[in-house]
Amino acid sequence: MAKQYLIAPSILSADFSELGSQIRTAEQAGADWIHVDVMDGHFVPYLTMGPFIVEACRNITSLPLDVHLMVTNPEQLLMPFAQAGASNLTVHVETCPNLHRTLQTIREIGCHPGVVINPGTPASMIEPVIHLVDLVLIMSVNPGYSGQVFLPEVLPKVTAVREMIDKYNPSSLLEIDGGINTDTLPLAIKAGAQVFVVATAVFGYPKGIAAGISALK
Ligand code: ZN
């Protein structure tokens, strides 16, 4: 299949006192999606943002909003995030005992369903639902904080999921999240990833947001 590469800056590393201008700068510099890392202080140690921030982003940009739910019981948050303007809603297999139903619900409420696995979770966990998703997200760090170091041991799993997607659902995108920068992005492309979540490599780039996106592209 023709591969399309997308950059999805995560606002987790943005300066929230200037969120509007930072998102506009990223959009003008060629960001393809805006990634929103939602953490609940239970599934992951840290606590971040809820539907209000997604709504604020929706009012700032027309880019797809890629909402990554690192929360226990994501089912109860699907509708609030959909109503706030989320484009993609991605849930962790580790948090969804009724994964088929959760993914079907996401599609029914008008969003693109995505499934995500942690570094310690095998690729086989997503095989039963691969036909239901528009997006598979592979964590290349353990979720919870911005600025962690890429775990190269996830690369064989990226390749395994690439093969699974090509075989069972070629229209699904394959995204990677965690420690992506100009050094690790080529490794992720080689393994088969297409969508790259970047946080500090964009919003914390020493020469600015636009230069960070340009370096990655
Ligand atoms: Zn994320």
Image (tube, grey):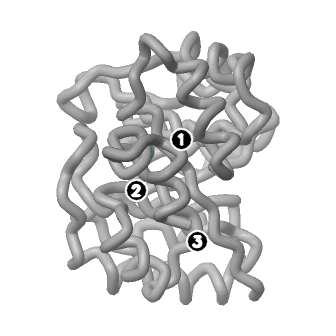
Quick one: SS at disc 2?
strand
Mark 1 C-beta to ligand 1 under 8 Å: yes
- Quadrant of the rendered image holding ligand 1: top left
Pointer 1 or 2: first along the chain: 1
Query: Which quarter of the figure is the N terminus placed in?
Result: bottom right
Vertically, is 59 above or below 171? above
The one of 159 and 204 positioned closer to us in this rendering: 204
- Residue 163 visible to the viewer: yes
**CA gap, disc 3 to disc 2?**
11 Å
Drawn side of residue 74 relative to residue 142, left or right: right
Quick one: SS at disc 1?
strand
Vertically, is 140 above or below 26? below
Q: Which mark is residue 177?
A: 2
The one of 40 and 105 positioned closer to us in this rendering: 40
Q: Which mark is residue 35?
A: 1
* Residue designated by label 3: 194
The one of 171 and 210 positioned closer to us in this rendering: 210
Contact flag, marks 1 and 2 (Cβ < 8 Å): yes
Mark 2 C-beta to ligand 1 under 8 Å: yes
